[in-house]
Structures are given as structure tokens and as C-alpha cells.
Amino acid sequence: MKIDGYKFGQKNNWRKWVWNRICERLTVPKKDAVIVYLAGIEDMDRTIACQKGFNPNNMIAVDKNKKVIQSLKEKGALHIHSDLTSALIAFGNTKTKIDVLIGDFCCGLVYDIEELAVRFPADAIGDAFNDNAVIMMNFLRGRDNGGMLEIRDTIENTSEKHRGKLFIEFFLRSAAMWTDGLLFHYYKHQKPTIARAVFQMNFKEKKVIHENEEPDPIGYENYLSKEMGYDKLFGSTIDFHMYRIKNGLNAVFNSYKSGNMVMDSTVFLYAKNVLVWGVDKTEEIEAVKSLTRKISSTLAVRTMKQKGVLKPSPTI
């Protein structure tokens, strides 16, 4: 991991690194990839994405800043006035799915990012993505609030400073706990068919336990050993799921220096085949109904741009 001295060109070099890693991991043609990104006032990612062959009509900017939204509106770029978490939940209620997400945050692991990290593996957000969507997150090192530091106490390597690595660690721990809890539920309630559908694995069409019998932890471990290759060397079933999910993410990390500040980033895959879903999300969907309608309208404009009915989105 290299940390360069501050120059205006250094962030541009970092941005090229990011988009090269995205292109390496992308599983759909660039011209078809739907990109949701935090634009910022300069909207720098638009230029390099278009240079790489991505379609500007498929780039949808998200920002809470009214000045940024106004700037995007004036130049004809597709935009959503919202925080990122709400936008992702609302996006999940549309037919269009995200292939690339750019989260270039000008902050540390503050409370909103903490919430995003621990909710990222759940289906309310996961519904927004295509399988193996490419995610980039970039954070300012050392500008955190108390909430994230409290969660960090639960992580073995508390000396880790890289905010991208910490985000992935929170993501993994949350994903592993969702997975372990719901898979245990399937085991307990004898629903191997549901488990197979979720994990796309070869679960047996037979009861794991007897009717109304409470499963014991040893029985559950044997079940995981048989169906998913669990080994007690992992220490716990949660550690095992963290290992499985981590391999699926194919995450890479980078850092660069901007004056006295250090920015930490990660690029990884949203690998649905190693994540677990099945939680009731009715309340979350209800909370973003209005935003979902606005996103649907934005996607309708996108369609008209693609058909040539409206002026195409800008490339810079």
C-alpha cells in the first residue's frame, strides 16, 4: 500500500487506480453498467468513467448538498437528492439494479457510515445491486465519531488504522452474524429448501432434526460441516462465515495523502452468493416510498436519454 505526498495530481492518480480496479472486476459490459456515485461539486468521476468507456446516461449521482444537486441539474446529469443509505434502499424497490457504486466520502467512519457498514449485507440494501456489483468506498482517516470507535472494540485487530479495512471488517462481521443467525433459523425450523435457494448450494431434501426438537450447537456445527465445509479450526461458526464472505469480496485497498490528511479506500465485490437474505424489510421500504418514486422518475428520464428523446447526459 503506497501513500503519496500531496499534489493535485495524486487524487487523479488514485481515481485512475480506482476505475482500473472497477474495470478488472466488472461482470457486465461497460456501456451497460449502471453507476450510482457520490458526485461532489467537481463531479470528477464522470470524466474518467466516460474515458474508460462507461455510458454517461447510466451514471446517477447521489448527494445531500443542494448546491451539488443544482450544479448537476444545470448540466443535465441524472441526480438524486438524498443520503446514500436511503437512496440504496429506495433503489432496491426499482427494476433497475446497480453495477457500480462509488462512495467517495469526505469524512471518517462517522455514525452514518457505521450504519451503512452494518446494514450493507442486509437485503433492504442488497436488493439495489446486481450480483457481483463493484463497490468503492473512500474515507478520511482519523475523523470518526464515538459510535464507530465503540464497535471497533469488538474487533480483534484494534490497532488497524486503515478506514477501508475497518469498513470491510464491520461489513464482514455484520454479514457473518446475519448469515449465522438465519442459517441456524433454517436448520432449527427444518427448511433446507429455503436455505438452498438462498445459498444456491446442494442442500439435502431431508429433515435435519426431528419434529419440534430444539437443535443443539454441536448438531448445527455438524450441519454446517456437511453442507458448507465448516471446520472447527475456524474457532466459531461466525469466524467461518467471515472467512467465506471475505473470499467472495475480492477486496483491495489503497491510501493517499492530501496535505496533513490521509484518505483510505477499498474496492470490493457485492457477492450475493456468499451473503444471506430473508429479513422483513417492510418498514424500511415504507420509509423511502417518496424517494423511490423520485428515483423511478429519474430512471424514466434515463430511458428517454438513451432513446435520444432527451439530450444525453454530459461526459464531463
Image (cartoon, rainbow, N blue to C red):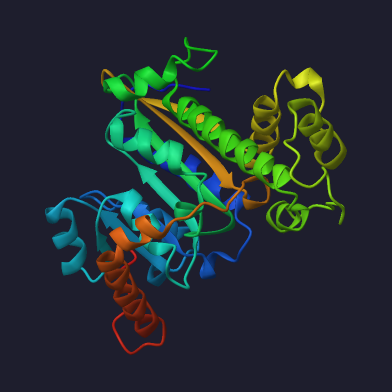
Q: Quadrant of residue 306?
A: bottom left
Q: Position of residue 149 (x, y in %)?
A: 35, 18
Q: Position of residue 209 (x, y in %)?
A: 82, 42
Closest to the observer: 93 or 257? 93
Relative to residue 111, is residue 74 depicted above or below? below
From this viewpoint, is residue 6 visible?
A: yes
Residue drawn at x 35%, y 24% as measured from the top left = 148
From this viewpoint, is residue 258 visible?
A: no
Residue drawn at x 55%, y 13% as measured from the top left = 156
In this rendering, position of residue 40 left or right of residue 29 = left
Q: Quadrant of residue 111?
A: top left
Closest to the observer: 68 or 249? 249
Residue drawn at x 64%, y 36% as measured from the top left = 180
Q: Position of residue 232 (x, y in %)?
A: 80, 21
Q: Position of residue 51 (x, y in %)?
A: 44, 59
In this rendering, position of residue 306 left or right of residue 232 = left
Q: Quadrant of residue 150?
A: top left
Closest to the observer: 269 or 49? 269
In this rendering, position of residue 225 left or right of residue 276 = right
Relative to residue 210, is residue 31 depicted above or below? below
Image quarter where the C terminus lies is bottom left
Residue drawn at x 84%, y 32% as measured from the top left = 222
Give the residue furthest to the front.
Answer: 212
Give the residue furthest to the bottom.
Answer: 309
Relative to residue 287, is residue 179 depicted above or below? above
How many badges with numbers are in the image? 0
Relative to residue 143, is residue 246 depicted above or below? below
